[in-house]
Structure formats: C-alpha cells, structure tokens
Amino acid sequence: MEQGTLRVSVWRGDAAGGAPQFYEVPARANQTVLDVVTHIQREIDPSLAYRFACRVGMCGSCAMEVNGRARWTCRTHVKKVAQDGTLELRPLANLPVIRDLATDMAPFFDKWARARGTFQPKDAPDGAVPAEFHIVPPATPKRQAADAGIECIGCGVCYASCDIVAWNPEYLGPAALNRAWTLVNDVRDGARQERLAVVAGDAGCHACHSTQSCTERCPKGIDPSGAIAGLKRTLFWNVFGVSR
Amino acid sequence: MSTRGGTHLWVAQRVTAMFLAVAVLVHLATILVAVRGGLSAAEILGRTRGSAAWLAFYAVFALAAGLHGAIGLRGIAAEWLGWRGRGFDAAWLTIGLLTAIFGIYAALGLYAA
Ligand code: SF4
Ligand code: SF4
Ligand code: FES
C-alpha cells in the first residue's frame, strides 16, 4: 500500500569525495531502509552502489548511517527513523568509502585478525579436529561470558559509532575486542596469553573510554563496552600474576 | 609504547587514583582542621616539622599525583594532538617525575624546616 512519498538524500561519490543526491521514493507500510535503497537502485538509478545479502539481520553487510546514526538497514523500519518523511543515508563512518553507500570493511576485519580473533584449539594447535569433545557446561561463568558476545554478525555498526576509532586509527575497536573477549573466556582455546598481550595497550582495550556508544547501538544487543571492561580487568590481575 | 607497557601504565593510573581518592580527602580534612585556629606558618610547621609520617604521606601523594597526571595528559595529548610514540612517552615520564620531585622537595622542606 502506498502512503505518500519519502524524500531520501543519498551520499554519492567515492574515495575522492562526493555529495548527497536527492530521490523521491514511494512510502509503503513496513518498509525497511534497505527496501528504500533497493527501490532507488532498481527503479531510479541503477548505478547506485550498496551492499546487502541476507536481508534478515544475519550477514552484517547492510549497515549504513541513517539520519546520522549507524544502523543495520535490513532490520530498520523507515517509520522508526524517518524525520518528517525524510531519510539521510551515508556510508558507514570510520571506514574508507569504495563507492556511494559501500565501504571497505578490510580495516575492520584486519583488526579482528590483529586481535587474534581466530579460535585456536588447545588440544590441536595445528588446527586438527580434537579427538574428544570438550565439555563446557552452559551454566559456568566463563561460558556465559563467551555466550554474551558470540552472536556478533560483524556489521561494523559499533565500529562506526566509536569516537576512539575516529581519533586513533590504530585502535582495534569494539567488535574485534568483543571477539577477543569471547575467546579469552573460551576454555577450549589455547592462545589466551598471546591474545591478552595483543589486545592490551594504546591500540587495544586501554584506549577505550567506556562511553558505551557501541553497546547502545549494537543491533544484536551485544555489550562490547562490557567485554572491553572485562579485558581490562583480566589484564589488571594478570600484572599481579592472578589469572581470572 | 608496547602493549605490555600499556597495561602497566593503566594499572599505575588506577592504583594511583585509588590512593589519591583517599589522600585528597586526608589533605582536605587537614586543611579544614588546620585553619580552625587561624592559618599560620608556625602552626603548619609545628605539625610537619620532624614528622616522618607527614613526610611519607606527602612524598607518596606527590609521586602518585605526578604519575597520575602525566599518564592522563599523555592519553589526552595522544587523542587530541596525535602526540604518540617513544619520544613523547619519555617526555611525559620526565614531566611526571619532575612534578613528583618538586612535591617531594616541598614536603622535605616542611619536614626539615
Ligand atoms: S565503550 Fe569503548 S569501544 Fe565502545 S564506543 Fe565507547 S570508546 Fe568505543
Ligand atoms: S558487536 Fe554488534 S554492532 Fe558490533 S559488529 Fe558485532 S553485531 Fe555489529
Ligand atoms: S542484509 Fe544481512 S544483516 Fe542486513
């Protein structure tokens, strides 16, 4: 059902620069921001670049700045975010732009690698499948701490919302540190000390100001700020030889 | 700054903060008590002269304040001015220790006056 017209400003350009362009899109019931972008690309200007895959909040590829705030666009309803029938869409902040609404996520995922975001099985350091299953009771505190951060879809919303990432390009950022914290709590993992070493310091958890924009904006309800506080706590006691 | 050093700086700042939280209260309470009979140099010196306890308190206070302040300023300068790296770290350490030494020197003066 058509319900009037949305006025949509979309940033168009590339790494060299760009400017907003304006489009009129028919408003519909239950329309998502991604639906609006798709309408523009299919019906108005096929040269518009953007990224999506699953459309159901699983893949983490569709994040953009919507009216100045990073959001997953496939699960964001227009009626929740439009201001007086207008939408302003820009590429995700804190990442290089490839073209239009598509950013280069490479720096974001490179930082996951730098934070040792890969699971390293204790019993099989060479990557082989361990002979026995590890039993990790769901009620144990470490398992619960790992579970709290495990559903991250790598959308970059937290990364785009963090002022420290903007101020310090070396900063690993909330998502990579949240990932590191899940692995620090994974009792099957064998790289705990190495991981703690790389997430410490000025580019790591100690740069975080605990402002919690990441936690506030994560569409999956994850608390990267709390994860970072956990890393700081663990590193604090580590200095005194206490392993927690 | 190595990542290990980063943790140590953070620990130093948190530990000095804990000490300063208490020390500043002691310091303020002392001021309130001290001015009740009117503020005079003789009265202050009467309390501090030859007192190893006050000397130790203010020496640790000055050291904690110097380090805490320098680590904090280091963080602000790194974020706002992009002052990062070994050279700046050495400068901040010097500033922190100089501040501490001035404070300790003053405390020594009151002790030995
Ligand atoms: S809590 Fe830390 S990681 Fe999260 S937005 Fe604030 S500074 Fe960034
Ligand atoms: S922590 Fe949340 S906001 Fe950050 S990348 Fe993961 S899902 Fe996205
Ligand atoms: S398209 Fe997959 S999360 Fe939005």
Image: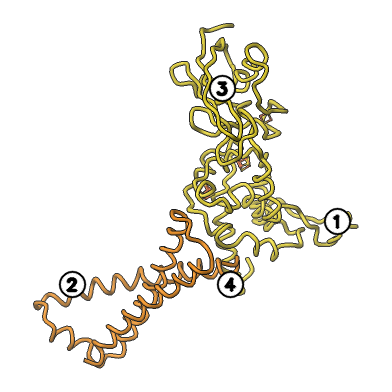
Chain colours: A yellow, B orange
Of circles 1 and 2, the one toward us is 1
**Residue B3's spot in the image, x, y percent?**
60, 65
- Label 3 is found on which chain of the structure? A
**Viewport quadrant of the N terminus of chain A:** top right
Q: Are marks 1 and 2 in contact (CB under 8 Å)?
A: no
Q: Are marks 4 and 2 in contact (CB under 8 Å)?
A: no
Q: CA distance from mark 3 to mark 4?
A: 47 Å
Dot 3: element: loop
Residue that carries the numbered disc 3 in the rendered image = A77
Dot 1: element: loop
On whether disc 1 and disc 4 are found on a single subunit, the reply is: yes
Residue that carries the numbered disc 1 in the rendered image = A127
Q: CA distance from mark 1 to mark 4?
A: 30 Å
Residue depicted at 65% across the width and 18% down the height: A38
On whether disc 4 and disc 2 are found on a single subunit, the reply is: no
Residue type, mark 4 in image = Val
Q: Is residue A90 left or right of residue B58?
A: right
Residue that carries the numbered disc 2 in the rendered image = B32
Dot 2: element: helix
Q: Quadrant of residue A157?
A: top right
- Label 2 is found on which chain of the structure? B
Residue depicted at 9% across the width and 77% down the height: B38
Residue that carries the numbered disc 4 in the rendered image = A239
